[in-house]
Image (tube, helix red, strand yellow):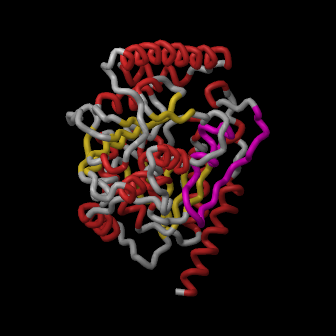
Amino acid sequence: MRGHIKEVLRTLRLGPSVRGLRRWGWWIVDAIGGIYFTLLRLAGVVPPCKRIERSRIARVLIIRIDRIGDLILSTPAIKAVRNTFPDAEIHLLVSEYDRDLVMHNPNLNKILIHKKDVVDSDYDLAIALHPCILQNRLTFRSGAEWRVGYTGWGGGFFLTHKLKDDRAVRVRHEVESALKVVKEAGCEIKDKKLEISVTEEGERFAEDFFKKNFLMNSDLIITIHPGARQEYIRWRKEGFAEVSDKLIKQNAKVILIGGKEEKQLVEATGSLMEGKPLFAIGLRLTQLISLIKRSDLFIGNSTGPMHIAAALKVPVVAVFGPVHPLDSYKEWGPWGEGHTVVSKNLDCPECHPTDCRTFDCMRLITVEDVMEAVRVQLGKIKELSVKG
Protein backbone atom coordinates (compact mmCIF):
# COMPACT_ATOMS: atom_id res chain seq x y z
CA MET A 1 0.00 0.00 0.00
CA ARG A 2 2.78 2.40 0.97
CA GLY A 3 4.62 1.72 -2.31
CA HIS A 4 1.39 2.33 -4.26
CA ILE A 5 0.88 5.70 -2.56
CA LYS A 6 4.45 6.70 -3.41
CA GLU A 7 3.89 5.77 -7.06
CA VAL A 8 0.69 7.85 -7.18
CA LEU A 9 2.50 10.83 -5.67
CA ARG A 10 5.24 10.53 -8.29
CA THR A 11 2.64 10.95 -11.04
CA LEU A 12 1.32 14.21 -9.59
CA ARG A 13 2.50 17.42 -11.24
CA LEU A 14 3.53 19.73 -8.38
CA GLY A 15 3.53 23.35 -9.45
CA PRO A 16 5.93 26.03 -8.21
CA SER A 17 3.41 27.16 -5.57
CA VAL A 18 3.24 23.67 -4.06
CA ARG A 19 7.03 23.35 -4.04
CA GLY A 20 7.23 26.78 -2.44
CA LEU A 21 4.86 25.67 0.31
CA ARG A 22 7.02 22.60 0.89
CA ARG A 23 10.13 24.76 1.24
CA TRP A 24 8.30 27.00 3.69
CA GLY A 25 7.25 23.87 5.59
CA TRP A 26 10.87 22.80 6.04
CA TRP A 27 11.80 26.34 7.04
CA ILE A 28 9.12 26.32 9.76
CA VAL A 29 10.24 22.89 11.01
CA ASP A 30 13.84 24.08 11.19
CA ALA A 31 12.86 27.34 12.90
CA ILE A 32 10.89 25.54 15.62
CA GLY A 33 13.57 22.87 16.01
CA GLY A 34 16.28 25.53 16.15
CA ILE A 35 14.52 27.38 18.98
CA TYR A 36 13.98 24.12 20.86
CA PHE A 37 17.64 23.08 20.57
CA THR A 38 18.79 26.56 21.58
CA LEU A 39 16.75 26.25 24.77
CA LEU A 40 18.21 22.78 25.39
CA ARG A 41 21.72 24.18 25.03
CA LEU A 42 20.95 27.05 27.40
CA ALA A 43 19.63 24.51 29.90
CA GLY A 44 22.79 22.43 29.54
CA VAL A 45 20.90 19.39 28.20
CA VAL A 46 22.61 19.60 24.80
CA PRO A 47 26.30 20.63 24.80
CA PRO A 48 27.26 23.81 22.90
CA CYS A 49 28.70 23.58 19.38
CA LYS A 50 32.48 23.49 19.44
CA ARG A 51 35.27 23.27 16.91
CA ILE A 52 36.02 19.68 15.85
CA GLU A 53 39.08 18.32 17.63
CA ARG A 54 40.73 15.67 15.45
CA SER A 55 42.69 14.18 18.33
CA ARG A 56 39.45 13.25 20.10
CA ILE A 57 37.85 11.43 17.17
CA ALA A 58 37.94 7.69 17.93
CA ARG A 59 34.56 6.54 16.52
CA VAL A 60 32.92 7.88 13.36
CA LEU A 61 29.48 7.18 11.90
CA ILE A 62 28.86 7.97 8.21
CA ILE A 63 25.24 7.92 7.05
CA ARG A 64 24.13 7.27 3.45
CA ILE A 65 20.83 5.39 3.37
CA ASP A 66 19.47 6.30 -0.07
CA ARG A 67 20.18 4.63 -3.42
CA ILE A 68 22.93 2.68 -5.19
CA GLY A 69 24.35 5.56 -7.18
CA ASP A 70 24.31 7.89 -4.18
CA LEU A 71 26.43 5.48 -2.15
CA ILE A 72 28.89 4.81 -4.97
CA LEU A 73 29.38 8.55 -5.47
CA SER A 74 30.07 8.87 -1.73
CA THR A 75 33.04 6.47 -1.70
CA PRO A 76 35.65 9.22 -2.25
CA ALA A 77 34.22 10.99 0.81
CA ILE A 78 34.41 7.78 2.83
CA LYS A 79 38.05 7.36 1.85
CA ALA A 80 38.76 10.96 2.86
CA VAL A 81 37.39 10.22 6.34
CA ARG A 82 39.70 7.21 6.63
CA ASN A 83 42.72 9.18 5.42
CA THR A 84 42.03 11.89 7.98
CA PHE A 85 41.29 9.55 10.88
CA PRO A 86 43.49 6.50 10.12
CA ASP A 87 43.16 4.98 13.59
CA ALA A 88 39.46 5.65 14.13
CA GLU A 89 36.68 3.06 14.17
CA ILE A 90 34.62 4.04 11.12
CA HIS A 91 31.09 2.68 10.65
CA LEU A 92 28.80 3.21 7.65
CA LEU A 93 25.00 3.15 7.91
CA VAL A 94 23.38 2.08 4.61
CA SER A 95 20.16 0.57 3.28
CA GLU A 96 20.10 -3.22 3.21
CA TYR A 97 20.12 -3.43 -0.59
CA ASP A 98 23.25 -1.28 -0.86
CA ARG A 99 25.35 -3.32 1.56
CA ASP A 100 27.08 -5.40 -1.12
CA LEU A 101 28.51 -2.25 -2.72
CA VAL A 102 30.80 -1.63 0.26
CA MET A 103 31.03 -5.11 1.74
CA HIS A 104 34.82 -5.20 1.36
CA ASN A 105 35.58 -1.49 1.44
CA PRO A 106 38.98 -1.23 3.20
CA ASN A 107 38.11 2.17 4.65
CA LEU A 108 35.34 0.80 6.87
CA ASN A 109 35.43 -1.19 10.10
CA LYS A 110 31.74 -2.03 10.15
CA ILE A 111 28.64 -1.75 7.99
CA LEU A 112 25.30 -1.10 9.70
CA ILE A 113 21.95 -1.75 8.03
CA HIS A 114 19.30 0.93 8.42
CA LYS A 115 16.11 -0.26 10.20
CA LYS A 116 17.82 -3.55 11.05
CA ASP A 117 20.96 -2.94 13.10
CA VAL A 118 21.01 -0.97 16.33
CA VAL A 119 23.07 2.21 16.05
CA ASP A 120 25.15 2.89 19.16
CA SER A 121 25.03 6.25 20.90
CA ASP A 122 28.71 6.65 21.68
CA TYR A 123 30.20 8.06 18.47
CA ASP A 124 32.45 11.10 18.46
CA LEU A 125 31.68 12.29 14.93
CA ALA A 126 28.60 11.66 12.78
CA ILE A 127 28.39 12.68 9.12
CA ALA A 128 25.18 12.78 7.05
CA LEU A 129 26.17 12.89 3.38
CA HIS A 130 22.68 13.61 2.02
CA PRO A 131 20.40 16.58 2.87
CA CYS A 132 17.52 14.87 4.64
CA ILE A 133 15.78 15.32 7.99
CA LEU A 134 15.96 11.58 8.68
CA GLN A 135 19.71 11.35 8.14
CA ASN A 136 20.30 14.52 10.17
CA ARG A 137 18.21 13.07 13.01
CA LEU A 138 20.29 9.90 12.93
CA THR A 139 23.43 11.96 13.55
CA PHE A 140 21.85 13.20 16.79
CA ARG A 141 20.78 9.70 17.82
CA SER A 142 24.38 8.56 17.39
CA GLY A 143 25.34 10.57 20.47
CA ALA A 144 28.16 12.24 18.56
CA GLU A 145 29.50 15.50 19.95
CA TRP A 146 30.14 16.71 16.40
CA ARG A 147 27.42 16.26 13.77
CA VAL A 148 27.96 17.42 10.20
CA GLY A 149 25.55 17.64 7.27
CA TYR A 150 23.35 19.75 5.01
CA THR A 151 20.41 21.93 6.01
CA GLY A 152 17.48 22.82 3.77
CA TRP A 153 15.38 19.66 3.84
CA GLY A 154 14.63 19.73 7.53
CA GLY A 155 16.59 18.75 10.60
CA GLY A 156 19.39 21.28 10.39
CA PHE A 157 18.95 21.89 14.11
CA PHE A 158 20.22 18.35 14.80
CA LEU A 159 23.63 19.35 13.40
CA THR A 160 26.54 21.15 15.03
CA HIS A 161 28.28 21.92 11.74
CA LYS A 162 25.90 22.88 8.94
CA LEU A 163 26.20 23.39 5.20
CA LYS A 164 23.51 25.16 3.20
CA ASP A 165 21.90 22.85 0.65
CA ASP A 166 22.02 24.73 -2.64
CA ARG A 167 21.22 21.76 -4.86
CA ALA A 168 18.34 23.56 -6.61
CA VAL A 169 20.72 26.15 -8.07
CA ARG A 170 24.18 24.62 -7.93
CA VAL A 171 26.24 23.15 -10.72
CA ARG A 172 28.17 20.60 -8.74
CA HIS A 173 28.53 16.84 -9.07
CA GLU A 174 27.25 14.65 -6.25
CA VAL A 175 30.80 13.41 -5.62
CA GLU A 176 31.81 17.00 -4.88
CA SER A 177 28.76 17.53 -2.67
CA ALA A 178 29.66 14.54 -0.48
CA LEU A 179 33.28 15.68 -0.33
CA LYS A 180 32.10 19.13 0.73
CA VAL A 181 30.47 17.60 3.84
CA VAL A 182 33.54 15.67 4.97
CA LYS A 183 35.71 18.70 4.27
CA GLU A 184 33.50 20.61 6.72
CA ALA A 185 34.27 17.81 9.18
CA GLY A 186 37.97 18.60 8.81
CA CYS A 187 38.84 15.85 6.34
CA GLU A 188 41.62 16.14 3.77
CA ILE A 189 40.76 15.33 0.15
CA LYS A 190 43.60 13.41 -1.50
CA ASP A 191 41.81 11.74 -4.41
CA LYS A 192 38.33 11.47 -5.86
CA LYS A 193 38.28 7.95 -7.27
CA LEU A 194 35.17 5.81 -6.89
CA GLU A 195 35.48 2.49 -5.06
CA ILE A 196 33.28 -0.59 -5.32
CA SER A 197 33.51 -4.11 -3.89
CA VAL A 198 34.05 -7.06 -6.25
CA THR A 199 33.39 -10.43 -4.59
CA GLU A 200 34.40 -14.02 -5.31
CA GLU A 201 30.73 -14.99 -5.41
CA GLY A 202 30.04 -12.35 -8.03
CA GLU A 203 33.04 -13.39 -10.11
CA ARG A 204 31.92 -17.03 -10.06
CA PHE A 205 28.46 -15.99 -11.24
CA ALA A 206 29.87 -13.91 -14.11
CA GLU A 207 32.14 -16.76 -15.18
CA ASP A 208 29.22 -19.21 -15.16
CA PHE A 209 27.04 -16.72 -17.06
CA PHE A 210 29.69 -16.45 -19.77
CA LYS A 211 30.03 -20.24 -20.02
CA LYS A 212 26.28 -20.90 -20.16
CA ASN A 213 25.80 -18.30 -22.88
CA PHE A 214 28.94 -19.26 -24.85
CA LEU A 215 30.52 -15.84 -24.38
CA MET A 216 34.23 -15.36 -24.87
CA ASN A 217 36.46 -12.72 -23.34
CA SER A 218 37.37 -11.76 -26.91
CA ASP A 219 33.71 -10.96 -27.71
CA LEU A 220 32.49 -7.37 -27.74
CA ILE A 221 30.23 -7.39 -24.66
CA ILE A 222 27.77 -4.51 -24.31
CA THR A 223 25.51 -4.22 -21.28
CA ILE A 224 22.32 -2.21 -21.74
CA HIS A 225 20.00 -1.09 -18.96
CA PRO A 226 16.70 0.32 -20.34
CA GLY A 227 15.20 0.90 -16.89
CA ALA A 228 15.19 3.86 -14.52
CA ARG A 229 13.50 4.82 -11.29
CA GLN A 230 11.26 7.52 -12.77
CA GLU A 231 9.64 7.99 -16.16
CA TYR A 232 11.24 11.36 -16.84
CA ILE A 233 14.78 9.95 -16.74
CA ARG A 234 13.92 6.84 -18.79
CA TRP A 235 14.61 6.81 -22.52
CA ARG A 236 12.05 4.86 -24.55
CA LYS A 237 12.40 1.08 -24.79
CA GLU A 238 11.94 1.21 -28.56
CA GLY A 239 15.13 3.26 -28.77
CA PHE A 240 17.12 0.82 -26.67
CA ALA A 241 15.77 -2.07 -28.77
CA GLU A 242 16.87 -0.42 -32.03
CA VAL A 243 20.31 0.44 -30.66
CA SER A 244 20.69 -3.16 -29.47
CA ASP A 245 19.78 -4.52 -32.90
CA LYS A 246 22.31 -2.28 -34.61
CA LEU A 247 25.02 -3.48 -32.23
CA ILE A 248 24.14 -7.15 -32.68
CA LYS A 249 24.43 -6.67 -36.44
CA GLN A 250 27.98 -5.46 -35.74
CA ASN A 251 28.66 -8.80 -33.99
CA ALA A 252 28.36 -7.39 -30.47
CA LYS A 253 26.94 -9.53 -27.68
CA VAL A 254 24.19 -7.50 -26.00
CA ILE A 255 23.10 -8.19 -22.42
CA LEU A 256 19.88 -6.52 -21.28
CA ILE A 257 19.89 -6.02 -17.52
CA GLY A 258 17.36 -4.86 -14.94
CA GLY A 259 16.09 -5.36 -11.43
CA LYS A 260 13.20 -7.65 -10.48
CA GLU A 261 10.77 -4.74 -10.67
CA GLU A 262 12.02 -3.99 -14.20
CA LYS A 263 11.47 -7.51 -15.56
CA GLN A 264 8.48 -6.53 -17.67
CA LEU A 265 10.27 -3.50 -19.17
CA VAL A 266 13.45 -5.41 -19.97
CA GLU A 267 11.56 -8.29 -21.57
CA ALA A 268 9.39 -5.85 -23.52
CA THR A 269 12.55 -4.20 -24.84
CA GLY A 270 13.86 -7.58 -25.95
CA SER A 271 10.55 -8.45 -27.63
CA LEU A 272 10.89 -5.38 -29.86
CA MET A 273 14.21 -6.58 -31.22
CA GLU A 274 14.99 -8.55 -34.35
CA GLY A 275 18.16 -9.97 -32.87
CA LYS A 276 18.50 -12.13 -29.78
CA PRO A 277 19.94 -10.42 -26.73
CA LEU A 278 20.91 -12.10 -23.49
CA PHE A 279 18.97 -11.30 -20.33
CA ALA A 280 20.24 -10.77 -16.79
CA ILE A 281 17.28 -9.75 -14.63
CA GLY A 282 16.97 -9.57 -10.86
CA LEU A 283 20.62 -10.23 -10.07
CA ARG A 284 22.17 -9.66 -6.68
CA LEU A 285 24.36 -6.57 -6.57
CA THR A 286 27.50 -8.71 -6.27
CA GLN A 287 26.52 -10.56 -9.45
CA LEU A 288 25.57 -7.41 -11.34
CA ILE A 289 28.88 -5.77 -10.44
CA SER A 290 30.93 -8.67 -11.79
CA LEU A 291 28.83 -8.93 -14.96
CA ILE A 292 29.20 -5.23 -15.73
CA LYS A 293 32.91 -5.51 -14.91
CA ARG A 294 33.31 -7.94 -17.83
CA SER A 295 31.56 -5.59 -20.26
CA ASP A 296 33.34 -3.51 -22.86
CA LEU A 297 30.64 -0.83 -22.88
CA PHE A 298 27.61 0.16 -20.79
CA ILE A 299 24.58 1.97 -22.24
CA GLY A 300 21.75 3.23 -20.06
CA ASN A 301 19.90 5.97 -18.23
CA SER A 302 20.80 7.78 -15.02
CA THR A 303 20.73 4.76 -12.72
CA GLY A 304 22.70 2.78 -10.15
CA PRO A 305 24.06 0.33 -12.76
CA MET A 306 25.41 3.29 -14.75
CA HIS A 307 27.37 4.43 -11.68
CA ILE A 308 28.56 0.86 -11.10
CA ALA A 309 29.99 0.83 -14.62
CA ALA A 310 31.72 4.17 -14.09
CA ALA A 311 33.19 2.97 -10.78
CA LEU A 312 34.55 -0.11 -12.56
CA LYS A 313 36.01 2.11 -15.30
CA VAL A 314 33.79 0.51 -17.95
CA PRO A 315 33.11 3.12 -20.68
CA VAL A 316 29.59 4.53 -20.37
CA VAL A 317 27.10 6.03 -22.80
CA ALA A 318 24.54 7.67 -20.51
CA VAL A 319 21.22 9.07 -21.75
CA PHE A 320 20.11 12.15 -19.80
CA GLY A 321 17.05 14.36 -20.15
CA PRO A 322 16.22 16.99 -17.50
CA VAL A 323 18.46 20.02 -17.10
CA HIS A 324 17.19 20.74 -13.57
CA PRO A 325 20.19 20.62 -11.20
CA LEU A 326 18.62 17.85 -9.12
CA ASP A 327 18.50 15.51 -12.12
CA SER A 328 21.00 16.73 -14.71
CA TYR A 329 24.18 15.01 -15.83
CA LYS A 330 26.15 17.86 -14.27
CA GLU A 331 25.21 16.42 -10.89
CA TRP A 332 24.52 12.76 -11.64
CA GLY A 333 26.51 11.98 -14.77
CA PRO A 334 29.09 9.16 -14.93
CA TRP A 335 32.08 10.16 -12.79
CA GLY A 336 35.53 10.00 -14.27
CA GLU A 337 37.07 10.30 -17.70
CA GLY A 338 36.22 8.43 -20.89
CA HIS A 339 32.42 8.47 -20.64
CA THR A 340 29.84 10.04 -22.96
CA VAL A 341 26.57 11.74 -22.05
CA VAL A 342 23.76 12.00 -24.62
CA SER A 343 21.51 14.96 -23.85
CA LYS A 344 19.49 17.49 -25.83
CA ASN A 345 20.17 20.26 -23.29
CA LEU A 346 16.83 21.87 -24.08
CA ASP A 347 16.41 25.49 -23.08
CA CYS A 348 13.95 24.95 -20.23
CA PRO A 349 14.97 27.55 -17.63
CA GLU A 350 12.07 26.59 -15.37
CA CYS A 351 12.73 22.86 -15.77
CA HIS A 352 11.27 20.78 -13.00
CA PRO A 353 10.46 17.16 -13.92
CA THR A 354 7.44 16.93 -11.59
CA ASP A 355 5.77 19.73 -13.59
CA CYS A 356 6.54 18.32 -17.05
CA ARG A 357 3.97 16.34 -19.01
CA THR A 358 5.79 15.81 -22.30
CA PHE A 359 9.39 14.94 -21.31
CA ASP A 360 10.63 16.44 -24.58
CA CYS A 361 14.21 16.32 -23.29
CA MET A 362 14.07 12.51 -23.41
CA ARG A 363 11.57 12.09 -26.24
CA LEU A 364 13.65 14.11 -28.71
CA ILE A 365 16.79 12.01 -28.21
CA THR A 366 17.08 9.86 -31.32
CA VAL A 367 18.59 6.46 -31.96
CA GLU A 368 21.20 8.17 -34.12
CA ASP A 369 22.13 10.46 -31.21
CA VAL A 370 22.87 7.44 -29.06
CA MET A 371 24.56 5.49 -31.86
CA GLU A 372 26.87 8.41 -32.59
CA ALA A 373 28.05 8.32 -28.96
CA VAL A 374 28.36 4.53 -29.13
CA ARG A 375 30.47 4.71 -32.28
CA VAL A 376 32.85 7.12 -30.57
CA GLN A 377 33.22 4.74 -27.64
CA LEU A 378 33.67 1.70 -29.87
CA GLY A 379 36.37 3.57 -31.78
CA LYS A 380 38.24 4.16 -28.53
CA ILE A 381 37.85 0.50 -27.56
CA LYS A 382 39.20 -0.62 -30.94
CA GLU A 383 42.12 1.78 -30.64
CA LEU A 384 43.00 0.45 -27.19
CA SER A 385 42.78 -3.17 -28.38
CA VAL A 386 45.16 -2.41 -31.25
CA LYS A 387 47.63 -0.76 -28.86
CA GLY A 388 47.29 -3.65 -26.43
Q: Quadrant of residue 113?
A: top left
Q: Is residue 339 magenta?
A: yes
Which residue is at 61% across, 81% downward? Answer: 383
Which residue is at 39% across, 72% downward? Answer: 215
Let me know if residue 276 appears in the view: no
Magenta-tinted stretch: 321-349
As drawn, is 50 to the left or to the right of 318?
left
Residue 165, x across and y down, in percent: 56, 33
Taking depth in this image into account, of 299 and 108 the one nearest to the observer is 108
Taking depth in this image into account, of 310 and 74 the one nearest to the observer is 74
Residue 75, x across and y down, in percent: 42, 53
Can you say which quadrant of the picture contains the N terminus?
A: top left
Taking depth in this image into account, of 6 and 87 the one nearest to the observer is 87
- Is residue 311 positioned above or below 67 on the image? below
Residue 153, x across and y down, in percent: 51, 26
Taking depth in this image into account, of 58 and 200 the one nearest to the observer is 58
Considering the whole magenta stretch, tell me its main secondary structure: loop
Let me know if residue 168 appears in the view: yes
How many marks are shown on the rendered structure? 0
As drawn, is 379 to the left or to the right of 162?
right
Which residue is at 52% across, 18% downward? Answer: 26
Residue at the limit of the structure toward the bottom, as seen here: 387
Residue at the limit of the structure toward the right, as seen here: 347
As drawn, is 33 to the left or to the right of 248?
left
Q: Is residue 384 magenta?
A: no
Residue 183, x across and y down, in percent: 49, 48
